[in-house]
Image (cartoon, coloured by chain):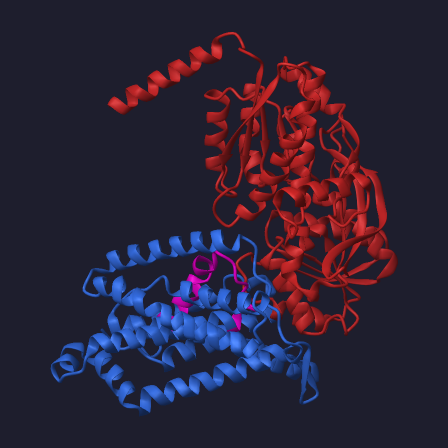
Chain colours: A blue, B red
Amino acid sequence: MEAFLSSLVSVAFHGIAYGMILYVISVGLSVTMGLMGFVNLAHGVFAMAGGYILTSAISRFGLPFPLALALAVIVVAAASVPLERLLYSRLYGAGELEQVLFTIGLIFMAVAAAQVIFGMLQQPVLLPDYLKGQFPLLGRDFPAYRVFLIVVSGAMIAALWFSVERTLWGAMVRAAVDNLAMAQSIGINTRRLFTLTFALGSGLAGLGGALGAEIIAIQPTYPFEHLVYFLIVVSVGGLGSLRGPFAAALLIGVTDTACKYWLPQFGAFFIYVATIVLLLWRPDGLFGKRI
Amino acid sequence: MRSKRFVTSLMVAAALLGAGPLAAQTIKIGFMSTYSGPGAAQGDQLDKGAKLYLKLNSGKLPKGVKVEVITRDDTGANPDVAKRVAQELIVRDKVQFLTGFVWTPNAAAIAPLTAEAKVPYISMNAAGVNIVNLSPYMARVSFTLWQSVYPLGQWAAKKFKRAYTAVSDFAPGHESEDAFTKGFKEGGGEIVDSVRIPLANPDFVPYMQRVKDAKPDVLFAFNPAGKQATAMIKAYADLGLAKAGIKYIGPGDITTDEELQGMGDVAIGVITVHHYSAAADRPANKAFVAAYKKEYGEKLNPGFMAVGAWDAMDVIFNVIRAQKGKLDPDKTMDLIKQYKNPNSPRGPIAIDPDTRDIIQNEYLREVRKVGGQLANVEIETIATQIKDPWKEFNKKK
């Protein structure tokens, strides 16, 4: 019993850490898909960019870890603005096929560019000493980095919820998600709102990629390899909501971890079975709005 | 229609050209490696090793003989593409050798072609244990997993009692699990549990937690080199398995020389067995590493795949020299079977005349920090001139 409880604790802990990363990376995708109706498959590119910025800022320029993390978020968010203005905004009204083709094309270009600049090998993450090793808590050792990851993502998620639920900008986003035409007609500048939201979503992806670089290795095929996980989080969670993907990411993180721990022989496909079952039960996702 | 006719006339022209007398002995070598997709890092190693050999040894051919290397991209573990490309190389370009090949499925796919067209093939990497059995025109200079893992299992049985095996769920993973289990059990060890981890797996922590809770003395691991191997070692380190007294061991594939720097300090202390380490202090290896760094940059270490490519080219050059540039496929295969090189960068090697597979030494290594860089430091030679054990155990009666 003692052993079971103890493994329960570690499964929950690791599952939450993994789910947090999935959430931070994917939440931007959910918001842009819900708000702008844009199928941005290239979302992982921003996460990968965040990872590359973090790893090179540390290894090439010797920046301390927290600064490199902040830099990753800011640079990715800033870089996404011209992308949105020049490329994405042209396809807002376009069909899904055009959007998918466009963003898949973006992924191919990003993969090739990353390969040319950084090579095919994965990037080492040089963690500062205070994030290495174990962190004792309640008589059990937890990996220090994962504790840090949960704390940072948790703080970030709280800030995000506050800004969406309690600020004017958040109110405008919610209004635009609910009814775009009405939001425009009462004078909300949706174009600027889109750009801002897109930048925020991309910045979050950059943060997720950078924070998660220690767990999900940064190398050129990143946006392809993990795309399916991001999409699962968004589709299970439901488009355009913050809570949905959060619940979905935690659910996936914890159940995936639990299944790998107790039933490793089924670990490979459990996540897909769970996705199918959930989507059969609720086709719009856990918290999705019926469109 | 027009383009079809154009292609046909090209093919006729090519056939006519090929049918004519061999003008100014140019030996054509079809070199298939991976230049695009996720496997491009491995393909790059073959490319670099082979090109380096050609550059440094082009003067060592008989007078009037030249080699022309026709390079093709097989795009990854992609048997259909490999077969098509190999067919083009054989039929259109009339190559006299096929070599390269990172991937076992690709090598398996072209095996019937080599037999039908009598084109000698030399595997620079593709290590699937059965490959050389598929065609009498196939030989290999790389390795098999049995060669490194079976002796590792025997060695581990002397040091440890209880082992846990965790391998990636694909053919090489299964092969290494079998080889380790056999070696370890024969030595009197006990396998506590075995797990096969899906290839598309971003988080290894749950698996490592399970290993930790099973309290073995040693963890045998095999994943594809690079991010998978690194992620698993990181999870092992994060959870403090080393402190819990669980040793991490595996074939050298998990700490390849080119990926090692990217793995970081977590890899320190990992014990592996392999036929090649860039850190080995044999003179032939020192010269090879120096030449490699001079050509490709101080920071870049050659890995075992670069050495495989280097040695494959050496086999080809030997065969060309022995036949003075006039190649006959069956003669070529006979010569390949007699190939011996006491001074490969990896130590003495030979081709086993019975199986056309490589005979080489296997070294026990530990990851240590040498001069600020991580290196696979060779501790001892645990198998001298070992043949592939799998073929020894499964001899055709």
**Where residue A66 appears, x then y in whole percent?**
54, 79
- Quadrant where the C terminus of chain B sits is top right
Image location of residue A35, percent across then percent down: 26, 75
The image shows residue A33 at horizontal and vertical percentages of: 29, 70
Q: Residue furthest left?
A: A185
Magenta part of the chain: A211-239
Tell me if B121 is positioned left or right of A273 in this view: right
Relative to residue A270, is residue A165 depicted above or below?
A: below
Q: Quadrant of residue A141?
A: bottom right
Left or right of B362? Residue A126 is left
* Residue A224 magenta: yes
Q: Is residue B87 above or below residue A187?
A: above
State yes or no: residue B161 in magenta. Answer: no
Q: Nearer the viewer, residue B160 or A168?
A: A168
Q: Tell me if I can see residue B260 in this picture.
A: yes
Position in image of residue A287 (x %, y %): 33, 79
Q: Is residue B237 above or below residue A225?
A: below
User: Toward which corner of the image does residue A29 lie, by quadrant?
Assistant: bottom left
